[in-house]
Image: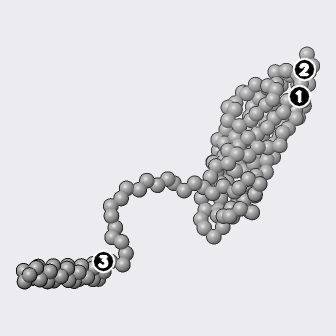
């Protein structure tokens, strides 16, 4: 029986020692662990943040963030002569004023009662520069002329930053009647 008591006491001592070691290890871990997790190497793929677009039905002024756009450009278009005859030369001139730069102009004609004797697309450095097209009438009728332009302008997000963007604008349509020639 003495041997049985000895084994029982040994088991209880070992259990106390194991519990004590567990408490010591727990205390060491609690004292040595940082308050913030340690950084681990990672691989992150990010996409560029898209430009905020106002929700459908809202104007840029109503949306968050608030955009500041320049005023719409103003087109001054002239046609000389204003009532050309078939076979005559025609000069179409436009001056677009507003805020922006690097405009590229394109003249649209519907139906094609004119042929271009100059380039259909004209590029210049600044808004406000006079641009012209040399045309020749080919048939009698009424045509709609419209000047389209693509130009750079500045857009600002209120209380944030500004950036440059390209936009398109068009003149009001101009009706030109080509008369029959005198011949």
Compared to residue 101, the image places residue 64 above or below, namely below
Mark 3, secondary structure of its residue = loop
Q: Which residue is mark 1?
A: 142
What whole-number distance in Å separates the C-alpha atoms at marks 2 and 3?
96 Å
Q: From the viewer's perspective, is residue 81 above or below residue 182?
A: below
Label 1: state its secondary structure: strand
- Front in this rendered view, residue 111 or 116: 111
Residue drawn at point x = 69 percent, y = 57 percent: 54
| Labels 3, 1: front one | 3
Query: In terms of image quadrants, where is residue 153?
Result: bottom right
Q: Position of residue 15 (x, y in %)?
A: 19, 79
Hey, which quadrant is residue 6 in on the image?
bottom left
The residue wearing badge 2 is 181
Label disc, if present, on residue 33 of the rendered structure: 3
Image depth: mark 2 or mark 1 in front: 1
Q: Write down the quadrant of residue 37 in the picture.
A: bottom left
Counting from the top left corner in percent of width and height, residue 159 is at: 63, 70
User: Are the residues at dot 3 and dot 1 in contact (C-beta closer than 8 Å)?
Assistant: no
Callout 2: helix, strand or loop?
loop
Q: Is residue 61 rendered to the left or right of residue 20?
A: right
Is residue 54 left or right of 84 when viewed as pictured? left
Whether residue 32 is visible here, answered yes or no, is no
Instruction: Looking at the image, tell me whether mark 3 or mark 1 is earlier in sequence order.
Output: 3
């Amino acid at each position: 029986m003495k041997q049985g008591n000895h084994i029982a006491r040994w088991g209880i001592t070992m259990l106390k020692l194991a519990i004590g070691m567990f408490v010591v290890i727990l205390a060491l871990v609690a004292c040595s662990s940082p308050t913030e997790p340690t950084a681990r190497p990672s691989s992150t793929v990010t996409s560029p943040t898209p430009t905020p677009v106002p929700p459908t039905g809202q104007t840029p002024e109503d949306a968050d963030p608030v955009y500041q756009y320049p005023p719409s450009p103003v087109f001054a278009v002239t046609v000389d002569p204003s009532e050309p005859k078939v076979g005559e030369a025609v000069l179409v001139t436009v001056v677009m004023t507003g805020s922006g730069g690097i405009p590229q102009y394109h003249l649209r004609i519907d139906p094609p009662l004119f042929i271009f004797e100059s380039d259909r697309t004209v590029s210049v450095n600044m808004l406000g520069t006079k641009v012209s097209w040399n045309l020749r009438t080919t048939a009698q009728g009424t045509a709609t002329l419209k000047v389209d332009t693509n130009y750079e302008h500045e857009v600002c997000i209120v209380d944030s930053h500004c950036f440059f963007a390209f936009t398109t604008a068009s003149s009001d349509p101009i009706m030109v009647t080509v008369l029959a020639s005198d011949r």
